[in-house]
Amino acid sequence: MSAAPAMATSGPGPGSQAAALEVDGLRVCYGGLPAVDDVSLRVEPGQVAALIGETSSGKSSLALGVARLLPSSAIVTGQVEIAGTDLAELPAREARRRRASLVGYIAQDAMAALNPVIPVGRQIAELFGVHRGMHRAEAGAQAVRELARVRIDRPERVARAYPHQLSGGMRQRVMIAMAMALSPPLLIADEPTTALDVSTQAEILGLVGQLQAETGSGILWITHDMGVVAELADVVAVMYAGRIVEQGPASDLFDHPMHPYTQGLLRTRRDLRTGRPGAPLYQIEGSPPALSAQRRGCAFAPRCARRTEICTERVPELMTQDQNLQAGNGPSGASPSRPLAAAASAPGNASAADPPSSRRPLGPAGTDLLTASWLAACHHPEVSS
Amino acid sequence: MTAPAPNIEPEVQDGRRDAAPVLHFESVSKYYRGLAALDQVTLSLGRGRALGLVGESGSGKSTCVRLALGLERPTSGRLTFRGADYPRSRRRLRTLRREVGFVLQDPYDSLDPRMRLREIVSEPLRAQRLRGRDTDRLVAEMLRAVGLGDAPLDSYPARYSGGGRQRIAIARALITDPAVLICDEPTSSLDVSVQAQIVNLLLDAKRSRDLSLLFVSHDLDLIGRVADTLVVMYRGRVMESGPAELVRSRPRHPYTKSLHDAVPADHPARRKVSTPGPAGPRESAESAVLRESAAQAKLAVLAESAVLAESPVPPGPDCCVFASRCAAAQARCYAERPPTVTEADGRSHACFFPLAG
């Protein structure tokens, strides 16, 4: 990837009532092996949806699949709409042109994503030249303004620099400037802070928070770090072995995770913070599974303490857990839900102040998209605190 | 874990452990092309203890590791192992390496994909010319100790996940029964759900083998959990050190505090950084370049690549290197180097205006 697929013709204008991103039944296969298996999710404008997962969970394949950036060897099925547009329905050339204005992509490795032999200012200016028909000088000036927008000091100088002359944090800012240059309705951030120092990470997270408040883009933020999720996300989807195993409003999910995997991740984190130095850490046994064609039952079952016979036989469906949550425990109230009702809460809707018991029960599953719906794919969901 | 023939002589009695460190840096500096990667660093690893080195890119953590492994020699200062200077001769250095095992960050890089487990794990023995008839037995024993009891000795590393590979690397590090194990970011390339397993394995080895750990990480939470003593480094200097719990909970140096503050929140209700405000943190081009190019450009390239920094002040001897990023900095911080002050509770810091702690 050279001059980053990032850009948009117009901001979230009047026509953007649609979700920033709506994914329905997405499947990504490499050589017959499903890396992403029937994933549905929705990101509202102005919302940060975090997708958390580890190696081979399929989170990056999902991101690339959504942006239609995967090589042709990957088989992508299912429906993806970005601000109401399905890129797959457009002819390749048209799709390429439109993608630029629909989705900004912030990669983990900015050094690899930026063109090493072109000054960063020109790389940004190129976007305005190609997609806005600006002249060279005009586009260059716009590029400098974009650099200033991501809080870079003396943007004129940075614009003339080559990527290798910038620090990691600066390069990541340049990537963000590029991704947001054309104000796309959707931003996909694929672990953009993983390679950075904590203080630089904190700066980048703060920056993205501010920019998003300014632009109102929807953000799909991919990460393996629960801390980044806590800092940024309105809603969270936890992925494991190609599927979403739990999703819901960020605060609630941190307070009362239901899937044993989510619980394990959060407990690992809590233990790191609060455990006594030198004492053994809480650990999840086993390791994430590799891609495999034939999978029986729940992918997490081999590592799960709550495993029973059914877990190894049937893949658990993603079900709404709101009733379950109210009942306090037990799988009794779970009912299948339409996946598109997924984790859709208005930004800020997910407030830690709401005690879970006072939560509005979900009507007929999926009817109210603004209800913070809570889903988990587990045969034995249990509320933990 | 069962230890093969322990060869660590109990030279010091338990009560005097800290008095006679296994590994000791005394005012060690290391310069690369005139730039200080380490600047008068003093640190001490006691027997059976865990010393945590924490800092960001370019802080000098990895230089400490290279010196401790005997891969490089300090420009000035003294480096001792069990009270004796690091040897100069290659032969004696090799003998010393028997006592210093290491586990590196990326198990995908550090294991040769063309070697079988048997060869990988027994490689230190071969290097030390200790390979005997029962090598296979020893290798199997080490693999069992790291939880890979049923791994075939003739398998290749490709067969194992990141966590599995890191276990193999630990088995390799422990096979000569070293006194010190140097862990350079041993879990940062692993999956979150696997990290704790590896840390527990290291803690377990530390306990059962009376091993001393030099644990290097940028993750303050993790390192505060593993180490007894923390050393916080910034641009080649020690900013603060002391008992891990104190340094973690009540930092004295503003840099340590800023590291703390940068660690993401543990709950969305307690966000630290991403509350949208009118004015954002502005990273000055100078500080960014200085901070990170040190690591990326391996310090030396700093001068050439500093297109953005008009005055890329190389860490001077006469100021606090953190001053330019410090909210509490005053004129004195730019004019003098803060001396290291040791306090009654065992902590020390190099700051003119320490926090209340």
Image (cartoon, rainbow, N blue to C red):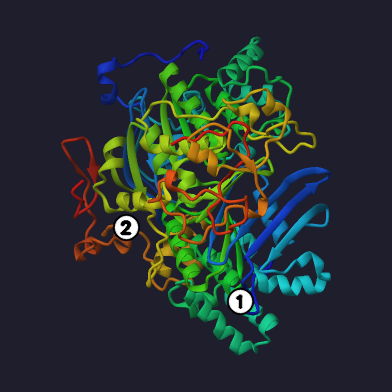
Residue B213 sits in quarter: top left
Viewer can see residue B92 = no
- Residue A165, numbered label: none
Asked which secondary structure carries label 2, the reply is: loop
- Residue A182, numbered label: 1
Asked which secondary structure carries label 1, the reply is: loop
Q: Amino acid at mark 2?
A: Val
Q: Are marks 1 and 2 on the same chain?
A: no
Q: CA distance from mark 1 to mark 2?
A: 39 Å
Location of residue A175 with respect to B142 vertically, above or below? below
Viewer can see residue A287 = yes
> In this image, A319 relative to B41: left or right?
right
Nearer-the-camera pick, A235 or B56: A235
Instruction: Answer few, some or many: residues within 10 Å of disc 1's Cα (few below 14, many 20 plus, some between 14 and 19).
Output: many
**Where does the image place residue A96, in percent across and percent down from the top left?**
76, 71
Of the 4 image quadrants, the one containing the C terminus of chain A is: top left
**Where does the image place residue A169, in percent across and percent down from the top left?**
49, 62
Q: Tell me which residue sits at (64%, 68%) in the image.
A: A18
Location of residue A190 with respect to A35 vertically, above or below? below
> In this image, A296 relative to B174: left or right?
right
Of the 4 image quadrants, the one containing the N terminus of chain A is: bottom right
Location of residue A358 with respect to B90 vertically, above or below? below
Q: Nearer the viewer, mark 1 or mark 2?
A: 1
Nearer-the-camera pick, B147 or B80: B147
Nearer-the-camera pick, A335 or B158: A335
Q: Chain of mark 1?
A: A
- Residue B321, numbered label: 2
Q: Amino acid at mark 1?
A: Leu
**Where does the image place residue A245, in percent across and percent down from the top left?**
62, 41
Residue B43 sits in quarter: top left
Location of residue A192 with respect to A148 vertically, above or below? above
Q: Tell me which residue sits at (38%, 28%) in the image.
A: A278
